[in-house]
Image (cartoon, rainbow, N blue to C red):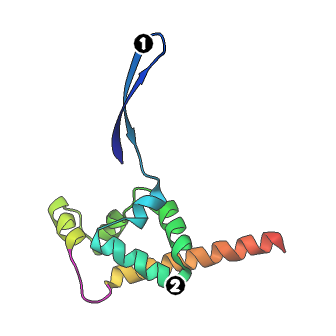
Amino acid sequence: GSGVFSLWRTKKGGEFKQLGYIMAPPAELWAYTTTPKDRQLRSYLIGKIGYVESLEILAQRYPSGSSMNDLARRKGIDKDEEMATMMQEEESGMDEDVKNLGDELVDLWNRFVLRELGKTA
């Protein structure tokens, strides 16, 4: 998100000031994620179900813009310093837990699409 300071001046000389914070929507957070394992998950899903669909399911499942808590749970990591290390790890190949999570999300997406198609038939 971004901080915003707004200043409005009225014709009568009044002045209104407001400080706000603009939050990015979940799909946008996923589109611009820089965490290596989240990028790997997004890329895997894009290859399986497409770009827009990947952002939709990731935004629904992980609205914070990261799957790291879920991946840490799957790996049995519960300490903050271990999780911070895992978040920054770059791997040359596909992380097995990321692939498994990706496969689960693809299956979830496919079931959703089939259910929606059944509604229109």
When asked about the image quadrant of residue 99, the answer is bottom left
| Marker disc for residue 97 | none
Circle 2 sits on which residue? 48
Which amino acid, by three-letter code, is at mark 2?
Answer: Lys
Residue under the point 44% across and 60% down = 28
Element assignment for label 2: helix
User: Which residues make up the magenta segment?
Assistant: 89-94
* First along the sequence among labels 1 and 2: 1
Q: Is residue 56 above or below residue 8?
A: below
Residue under the point 42% across and 24% down = 8
Which amino acid, by three-letter code, is at mark 1?
Answer: Gly
Task: Count residues near mark 1 (Cα–Cα under 10 Å), then give few for <14, some for 14-19, many for 20+.
Answer: few
Outermost residue toward the front in this view = 11
Does the stretch in magenta take in 76? no
Residue under the point 47% across and 17% down = 10
Q: Is residue 74 among the parts visible in the rendering?
A: no
Element assignment for label 1: loop
Could you tell me what secondary structure mostly forms the magenta stretch? loop
Q: Is residue 69 among the parts visible in the rendering?
A: yes
Circle 1 sits on which residue? 14
How far from the left and from the top, in percent, is residue 101?
42, 77
Q: Mark 1 to mark 2: distance in Å?
A: 56 Å
33 or 80, nearer to the observer: 33
